[in-house]
Structure formats: structure tokens, C-alpha cells
């Protein structure tokens, strides 16, 4: 079992909050540690937005808690009613993620007010200290690298997709193993989408960098869609192929085409990573292979309508996957050509400056 960066930073943020609380002489540093746990997020942008939401909701909770204490006291019924009001307000303001910590704030402040203002301010200071400690730790210690994580996940997902496609028609894997690997692929694609959204959320301040990142996001989005189309092809083969009996020659050609699609996808990833030789390009399957498979299905007289329909579902999924691969190839070429042109321009400017 490995310790992830977020797990490590959560523990570190708790330790920092407790240490600073003791150093500042807070009566309740434990509250700062609890706040730090709620504030740690998987990205810097989300951590910043969490701070803003936490400050809004906690200030609101403090005001309501103090007002309710002045008017009704701090009986258990009063505290419970105030919690209900705070929950409704957080939902209305669309900051539901902060409800847990805000309720902790309400209960702590209402309980502390019976001990006087110094105790209430001490608890509020602990909340602010926990929020600040978590943000500083998240920004300074191993800041998230969503781009690297995204590409690692793309490689793993593509590798698993290739294994499933290459064994779907040949039926080499046990059914239990195949289904387990298919579920794993679905989970990886979901995680990949999360990485994409976290990378897209990050803010870039330089105009040139923003334009470059927009182009990069277009390519990344297409990578996700392509993997989704591949996963849909796996589902189509698994659901439709084994429900009918097809010609052995058609099976062999379909298996060969799946092999060609997998190889094409692999080469696209290699090209993106700069692993192909200069001038080499990813070898795309022949554009008429899927059409040929479709025509042979329609021309099979002995096949009934159900068989033809099921096989057409498979070929249509093949076409959708291949179409996204070709689109991904074009987007990669445009991005890489633009990057190469900008690098050449930058080198020209440096040469002129040196002269």
C-alpha cells in the first residue's frame, strides 16, 4: 500500500495546525486540526475555492450562532434548530460541501459563548488557522501535477483497452477475468475524466500560456472521448458478438481490424510522447475495412435479421472508435506543428538577441 500525496499532506496539515495552535496559545487547537482535514483538496484551485466557501459559510454560521445564543440561549433544541437553518442556507447558497465544518463551527461557537467572548474568539481563530494551514501545505508541499497524472492514466487505460479488444473476439480470457478487467477500465476512464476536470480548472495568468493550454485541453478531451469509444466497442462485442453465430472469415477479418485499431491507438500515444522516429507517423487502418465488413454482413443471405443487426452494432462501434482515433491524430498533428513553429520562432528571437 502506497501513501498518496493527498494523504501525506492531510496528515502534515493536521500536524502544522496543531503545532501552530499550541505555539499561538489557543485553548482549542483541536478545532484547527479538524478544519485542516476538511480543507485539503486534490487541486490548488479547488483548495482556494474551498477556502472561499468555508469562510463564507463559517462567517454565516458564526453570525447565526451568536444571534441565536443572544435570543434563545444554547439549549440542545436551540442548537439543533440553528443547525437546520444553517444547512438550508448552505444548500440555498450552493455551498453544500462546507455544511459539515459549518455545523461544527455553529456547535462550537454556541457552546463557547456560554464561557464568554474570549473563548468564542479562540474557537474562531482555530477555524481560521486550520483553513490557512491546509492551504499553505497544499500549495507548497508536492503541488498537484494533473498533467502528468492525466497522461499516466491515459497510458494505463489504453493498455487495458488494447488487451480487452485483442481478446474480445478470440475469447482467450476467462469470462470472470474479462468482466473484472472491463470494470477496471470503466473505473480508470472515470478517474481520467476527474483528472481532466482538475487540470482544466487550474488558472493560468499569462495570455500565451492560456492559449497553449486551451489547445492542449482540446487534445486531452479527445483522448478521453477516444477511450470512451473504445470502451463502448468492448461492450458491443461482449454483448452482441457471442449472442449470434457468424462466419469464420468475418470473425478473422474483424479480429484483424481490432488489432489494427489497437496498434493505431498505441502509436498515437507514442507519437504524443515523442517516442516515434522523426518523420514517422502512426499507421492508420485502411479506411474501407469497416465498410467491407458491413457490406459482407448485408450480403450474407443465410444470416437472419437479428444476426445482421447485432453484427452491424459491432461494426458501427468499430467505425465510431476508428473515427475518433483519426480525429485524435489530426488534433495531435496540429498541436505538435504549432508547438514546433513556436519553438522555431523562439530560437530565432534568441539568435537575433545574441547578435
Image: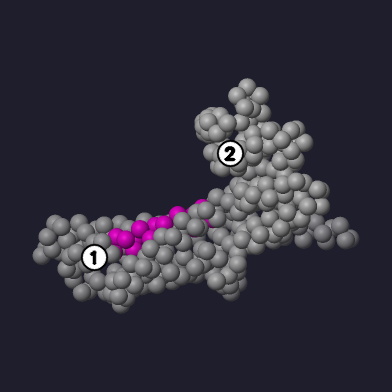
Is 279 placed above or below 38 here?
Answer: below
SS type, badge 2? helix
Region of the chain picked out in magenta, as a range: 219-237
In front of the other: 89 or 180 = 89
Residue situated in front as seen by the camera: 280 or 17: 17
Where the N terminus falls, by quadrant?
bottom right
Say which label, 2 or 1, has the lower sequence index. Answer: 2
Residue 164 horizontal side relative to residue 171, left or right: right
Q: Quadrant for residue 113, please give it.
A: top right
- Residue 46 visible within the image: yes
What residue is rendered at 86% in x and 57% in y? 353
Q: From the image, tell me which residue sits under label 2.
A: 103
Q: CA distance from mark 2 to mark 1?
A: 54 Å
Q: Give percent across and percent down for residue 69.
A: 64, 27
Mark 1, residues whose alpha carbon is within 10 Å: few (<14), some, or many (≥20)?
A: some
Crowd band around label 2 with a 10 angstrom C-alpha radius: few (<14), some (14–19), many (20+):
many
Residue 203 lies left or right of residue 117; in this view the side is left
> Marks 2 and 1: which is nearer the front?
2
Between 198 and 342, the one nearer to me in the picture? 198
What residue lies at 17% left-to-right and 65% top-to-bottom?
244
- What residue is pinned by disc 1? 241
Q: Which quadrant does the C terminus fall into? A: bottom right
The number of numbered badges drawn on the structure is: 2
Could you tell me what secondary structure mostly forms the magenta stretch? helix
Amino acid at each position: 500500500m502506497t501513501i498518496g500525496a493527498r494523504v501525506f499532506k492531510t496528515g502534515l496539515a493536521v500536524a502544522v495546525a496543531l503545532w501552530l495552535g499550541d505555539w499561538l496559545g489557543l485553548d482549542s487547537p483541536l478545532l484547527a486540526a479538524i478544519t485542516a482535514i476538511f480543507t485539503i483538496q486534490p487541486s490548488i484551485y479547488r483548495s482556494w475555492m474551498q477556502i472561499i466557501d468555508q469562510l463564507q459559510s463559517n462567517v454565516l454560521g458564526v453570525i447565526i450562532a451568536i444571534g441565536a445564543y443572544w435570543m434563545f440561549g444554547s439549549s440542545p433544541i436551540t442548537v439543533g434548530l440553528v443547525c437546520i437553518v444553517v444547512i438550508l442556507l448552505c444548500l440555498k447558497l450552493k455551498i453544500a460541501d462546507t455544511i459539515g465544518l459549518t455545523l461544527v463551527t455553529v456547535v462550537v461557537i454556541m457552546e463557547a459563548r456560554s464561557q464568554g467572548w474570549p473563548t468564542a474568539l479562540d474557537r474562531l481563530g482555530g477555524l481560521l488557522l486550520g483553513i490557512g494551514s491546509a492551504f499553505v501545505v497544499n500549495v507548497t508541499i508536492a503541488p498537484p501535477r494533473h498533467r502528468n497524472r492525466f497522461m499516466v492514466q491515459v497510458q494505463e487505460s489504453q493498455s487495458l483497452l488494447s488487451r480487452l479488444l485483442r481478446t474480445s473476439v478470440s475469447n482467450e480470457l476467462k469470462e470472470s477475468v474479462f468482466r473484472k478487467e472491463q470494470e477496471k477500465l470503466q473505473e480508470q476512464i472515470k478517474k481520467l475524466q476527474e483528472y481532466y476536470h482538475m487540470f482544466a480548472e487550474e488558472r493560468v495568468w499569462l495570455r500565451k500560456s492560456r492559449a497553449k493550454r486551451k489547445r492542449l485541453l482540446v487534445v486531452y478531451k479527445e483522448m478521453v472521448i477516444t477511450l470512451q469509444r473504445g470502451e463502448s466497442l468492448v461492450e458491443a462485442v461482449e454483448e452482441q458478438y457471442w449472442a449470434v453465430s457468424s462466419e469464420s472469415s468475418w470473425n478473422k477479418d474483424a479480429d484483424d481490424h481490432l488489432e489494427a485499431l489497437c496498434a493505431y491507438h498505441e502509436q498515437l500515444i507514442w507519437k504524443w510522447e515523442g517516442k516515434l522516429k522523426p518523420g514517422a507517423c502512426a499507421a492508420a487502418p485502411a479506411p474501407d475495412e469497416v465498410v467491407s465488413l458491413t457490406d459482407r454482413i448485408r450480403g450474407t443471405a443465410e444470416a437472419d435479421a437479428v444476426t445482421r443487426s447485432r453484427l452491424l452494432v459491432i461494426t458501427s462501434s468499430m467505425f465510431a472508435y476508428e473515427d475518433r482515433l483519426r480525429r485524435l491524430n489530426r488534433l495531435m498533428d496540429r498541436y505538435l506543428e504549432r508547438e514546433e513553429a513556436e519553438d522555431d520562432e523562439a530560437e530565432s528571437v534568441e539568435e537575433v538577441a545574441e547578435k
